[in-house]
Amino acid sequence: MKIKPQTPKGFRDFLPSAATRRAFLLDKLTLTFKKYGFEPLETPAVEFAQTLKGKYGEEEKLIYEFEDRGGRAVALRYDQTVPLARVVAQYQDLGGTLPTKARLTRRKSIWYYVVAGAEPDSKDVICG
């Protein structure tokens, strides 16, 4: 059986020309956020599924959920809100690790399931 080279539904490649334009725009956004006092925050692409489930209502069915090799239920982040809330809950009591007032910026890809036949949404990167 011959394998047809293609990306999975909901994912895409950025070829050099598009990747260059995209990087330029994202760098401009990052510099603008920095200019106004925002600091970067990095969260992993994968969260424990229980962290994400029960937070999105009807849209929860759009979450890519799977088991890792250790048998743990994990999922790709659907947006930036729940991972940010998890960071605050996880680090708030660690004595100054997180500022009490923070201007944070995140520039990360998100993933969500697209129903067969539906046009994929273009929310591949969220900045904020």
Image (tube, rainbow, N blue to C red):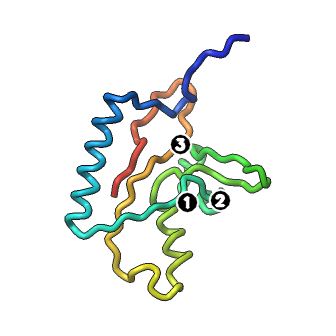
Helix, strand or loop status at disc 1: loop
Report the mark closest to the observer, 1 or 2: 2
List the residue tagged with mark 3. Answer: 112
Q: Secondary structure at mark 2?
A: strand
The foreground one among 7 and 120 is 7
Left or right of residue 109, residue 37 in this image: left
Whichever of callouts 1 and 2 sits on the residue coming sooner in the sequence is 2
Q: Can you tell which mark lies on residue 86? A: none
* Cα distance in 3D space between marks 3 and 2: 15 Å
Tell me: residue 18, above or below residue 4: below
> Which is closer to the viewer, label 3 or label 1?
3
Q: Determine the CA span between mark 1 and mark 2.
A: 13 Å
| Labels 3 and 1 touching (C-beta < 8 A) | no
For residue 40, which quarter of the picture? bottom left
> Residue at coordinates 35% horizontally, 53% vertically from top-left?
127
The residue under label 1 is: 55
Q: Residues within 10 Å of mark 3 (few under 14, many from 20)?
A: many
Q: Amino acid at mark 1?
A: Lys
Residue 50, image x and y in percent?
66, 61
Residue 79, x across and y down, in percent: 47, 53
Judge depth for marks 3 and 2 and give the one in front. 2
**In the rendered structure, are the residues bearing label 1 and label 2 in contact, judged by CB atoms less than 8 Å apart?**
no
Q: Is residue 64 left or right of residue 71?
A: left
Q: Position of residue 95 (x, y in %)?
A: 49, 88
As drawn, the label of residue 48 is 2
Q: Which amino acid type is marked by label 2?
A: Phe
* Local crowd size for mark 2, using a 10 Å CA cut-off: few (<14), some (14–19), many (≥20): some
Residue at left 33%, top 68%?
39
Residue sitting at x 61%, y 44%: 64
Q: Residues within 10 Å of mark 1 (few under 14, many from 20)?
A: few
